[in-house]
Image: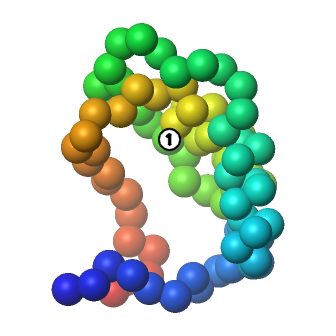
């Protein structure tokens, strides 16, 4: 089973071109250094980059993640 799929809302909630999207992500993740302690829980918003990218980026930039990460989120497509 493949988890890859075509971007459905590219250009609406995040940049439509890969280079623009990547620049947006890199900008959002600038700032604070990674924490010393391993991150056990991080609640990260998942709205479009323009709405929550800054908060999500700062949270993930500071997180010290383990090799295994559990992601829980809604299925907006119903697939």
Quarter of the image with the N terminus in it:
bottom left
> Helix, strand, or loop for circle 1?
loop
Tell me: 25 left or right of 3. Answer: right
**Outermost residue toward the top in this view:** 36
Q: Nearer the viewer, residue 40 or 76?
A: 40
Q: Is residue 2 above or below residue 57?
A: below
| Figure quadrant of residue 50 | bottom right
What residue sits 76% from the left and 54% below the top?
A: 24
What residue sits 42% from the left and 11% below the top?
A: 36
Q: Is residue 68 above or below residue 42?
A: below
Q: How many residues crowd around disc 1 within 10 Å: few (fewer than 14), some, or many (20 or more)?
A: some
Q: Is residue 55 visible?
A: no
Quarter of the image with the C terminus in it:
bottom left
| Figure quadrant of residue 42 | top left
Q: Is residue 52 above or below residue 9?
A: above
Tell me: 67 left or right of 29. Answer: left
Measured as percent of width and height from the top left, residue 11 is found at 76, 78
What residue sits 58% from the left and 85% below the top?
A: 8
Q: Is residue 13 above or below residue 43?
A: below
What residue sits 32% from the left and 79% below the top?
A: 3
Measured as percent of width and height from the top left, residue 73 is found at 37, 57
Measured as percent of width and height from the top left, residue 5 is found at 44, 85
Q: Is residue 65 visible?
A: yes
Which residue is tagged 1?
44
Measured as percent of width and height from the top left, residue 7 is found at 57, 82
Tell me: 41 left or right of 15. Answer: left
Tell me: 16 left or right of 4. Answer: right
């Amino acid at each position: 089973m493949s988890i890859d799929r075509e971007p459905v809302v590219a250009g609406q909630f995040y940049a439509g071109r890969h280079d623009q999207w990547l620049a947006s992500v890199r900008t959002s993740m600038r700032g604070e250094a990674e924490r010393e302690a391993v991150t056990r829980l991080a609640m990260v918003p998942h709205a479009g980059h323009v709405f929550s990218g800054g908060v999500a980026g700062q949270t993930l930039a500071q997180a010290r993640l383990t090799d295994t990460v559990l992601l829980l989120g809604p299925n907006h497509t119903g697939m």
